[in-house]
Amino acid sequence: MSAPGRGPSTQNASQRRSAARTAVVWEGLRSLLQDRSADGAGLRVLDIGGGTGGFAVRVAELGHHVTVVDPSPDALAILDRRSHESAVAERITGIQGDLATVSEQVDGASIDVVLCHGVLEVVDDPAAAMGAITEVLRPDGALSLLVSQRHAAVVARAMAGQFDQAQDLLRSDLGGTPHRFTAEDTRALLADAGFADVTLHAVRVFSDLVPSALVDLEPGAADALLALEHEVAARPEYLTLAIQIHAIAKRG
């Protein structure tokens, strides 16, 4: 029996609202993989910090071979279970480690596409981390990078009444931890690491601002929110409002 107020329709709406937070990233990544595997051959994909396999399993379902490097044994255990449940276990390899050691665990210049989602925020040196990524990428490889956007973090702190923290974030640069990035920071970081053809998408512009009750209970609201997120994702003026920035870039 469903809990009061959480019937099947409400649960589905909640799931769609959650999907709105990742849909833009997934569409960009799926398009990248399609372009890279036009001949039908599976790609070698490395998911750094891929944890429980939220993206890795879906990538493997497209026929690609995915190596997930993550420091958490618990997350890797969940990844293993999910990969078996989705019948893609033979295409997924989990390795305990992190970005600092990835070049020791993965052959150099062997990866077609690297996923680095939500990892640069917690490394000591984002520039050095980008260097580790380029070591494992093929010369013509591509990167899917997802980072937290600084301006949105400032707004979130201010709206929560944490004004001193908002000021600290406002004044911070890449030397702070956890790291937050503007669109300009992201482009500069990628250029310095030797990446070109950079495309930036605004992620979670509205999905964290709209009240949950409105999205869950109003008929059609979750789908409309998802459509709105897609509509603004490619508009540069919304990058400063996005919770995250998704970058697609090609090496060299």
Image (cartoon, helix red, strand yellow):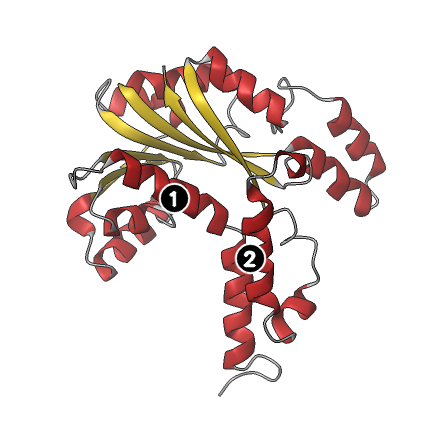
Q: Which residue is pictured at 35% across the width and 48% down the height?
A: 53
**Residue 113 appears left or right of 244:** left
Residue 27 spot, x, y in % from top left: 42, 47
* In the depicted structure, whether residue 246 falls above or below residue 131: below
Residue 29 spot, x, y in % from top left: 38, 41
**Residue 212 appears left or right of 69:** right
Give the camera-side residue of 194 and 177.
Answer: 194
* In the depicted structure, whether residue 140 falls above or below residue 121: above
- Tag 2's secondary structure? helix
Give the camera-side residue of 47 and 24.
Answer: 24
Q: Quadrant of residue 154?
A: top right
In this rendering, which labeled residue sits more in front, label 2 or label 1?
A: 2
- Tag 1's secondary structure? loop
* In the depicted structure, whether residue 204 falls above or below residue 81: above
Q: Quadrant of residue 145?
A: top left
For residue 227, the mark is 2
For residue 200, the mark is none
Q: Which residue is pictured at 55% across the width and 65% down the height?
A: 223
For residue 51, the mark is 1
Amino acid type indicated by mark 2: Ala
Q: Which residue is pictured at 26% across the width and 28% down the height?
A: 112
Residue 162, visible in the rendered structure: yes
Would you call the spot at circle 2 few (<14 residues within 10 Å), some (14-19), or many (20 or more)?
Answer: some
Q: Which is nearer the N-term, disc 2 or disc 1?
A: 1
**Residue 75 appears left or right of 168:** left
Residue 230 spot, x, y in % from top left: 54, 50
Would you call the spot at circle 1 few (<14 residues within 10 Å), some (14-19), or many (20 or more)?
Answer: many
Residue 82 spot, x, y in % from top left: 29, 56
